[in-house]
Image: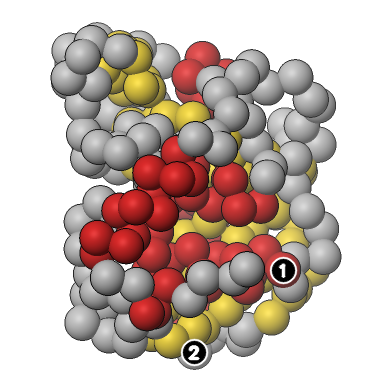
Amino acid sequence: MTIDYNTLTVPQATQLQKEMKDKIVLSPFTGKINYVAGTDISFDKFSTHVYAGITVLSFPDLKPVAYSLIRKEVHFPYVPGYLAFREVPALLDAWEQLELKPDVVVLDGHGIAHPRRMGIASHFGVLINRPTLGCAKKKLYGIYEEPAENAGAWSVLYDKQQQPIGSVLRTKNKIKPVFVSPGHLTDIADSRQIVEQCITKYRLPEPTRLTHNFVNQFRLGALEAGFHRL
């Protein structure tokens, strides 16, 4: 049964997150990565439309090979901690039209580093049943010590019960760290290592950075919706 997120109340969304949390599998990533994908969403807090994109890159050389773009109307309200209910429906449409499916997906957001362990990377991962992880620019939830200032330094992100839920990773010298957490079918260590392998000369991993650029061009009318090979 498909659930229409547009009709959900916040309490109903909370209940759905609790139910989906039981389906998350956190385990070491054992497969081979030939393709990695990044996702991103662009929207105005008060708009009823979102612009979603998924970019597929070869791995480990990180050359973009295809991307999928979707514009979709949404009506679930903008509520912190529930952004997946605005973003996932459009990402699912972008995923469905993606003719080249990746081995792992990096989402611009959190996985289990979320008050209910159900950030967008976990939410999306459970629905597509593929390995996913989140790499966010800011902390949503958790406690950590600042990692050393050199690139590659990291510290553990803990929940309030001192259970590890992710990593705080410095991707470049003396710049703000990113917050990495497993979504589904991977674990904390592998999620961090995958992000490390996706860093080029920028702070953010190449899959989500490129997708952000594509989605913004799409929103401005420079790119068209649909699946495109590069």
Residue at figure coordinates x 43%, y 86% from the top left? 73
Across and down, in percent, residue 13 comes to 33, 60
Of mark 1 and mark 2, the one earlier in the sequence is 1
Which quarter shows the N terminus?
A: bottom right
Horizontal side of 144 relative to 105 (left or right) equals left
State whether residue 213 appears in this view. no
Amino acid type of the residue tagged 1 in the rendering: Glu
Residue under numbered circle 2: 221
In percent of width and height, residue 17 lies at 39, 49
* Quadrant location, the C terminus: bottom right
Q: What number is the disc on residue 128? A: none
Task: Report x, y in % for residue 110.
Answer: 38, 41
Per the image, the residue denoted by label 1 is 96
Q: Residues within 10 Å of mark 2 (few under 14, many from 20)?
A: few
Amino acid at circle 2? Gly
Estimate the spatial distance between the alpha carbons at disc 1 and disc 2, rounded to whole Å: 22 Å
Q: Secondary structure at mark 1?
A: helix
Q: Residue at x 74, y 72 (%)?
A: 97
Up/down of 44 relative to 213, above or below: below
Residue at 69% in and 80% down: 226
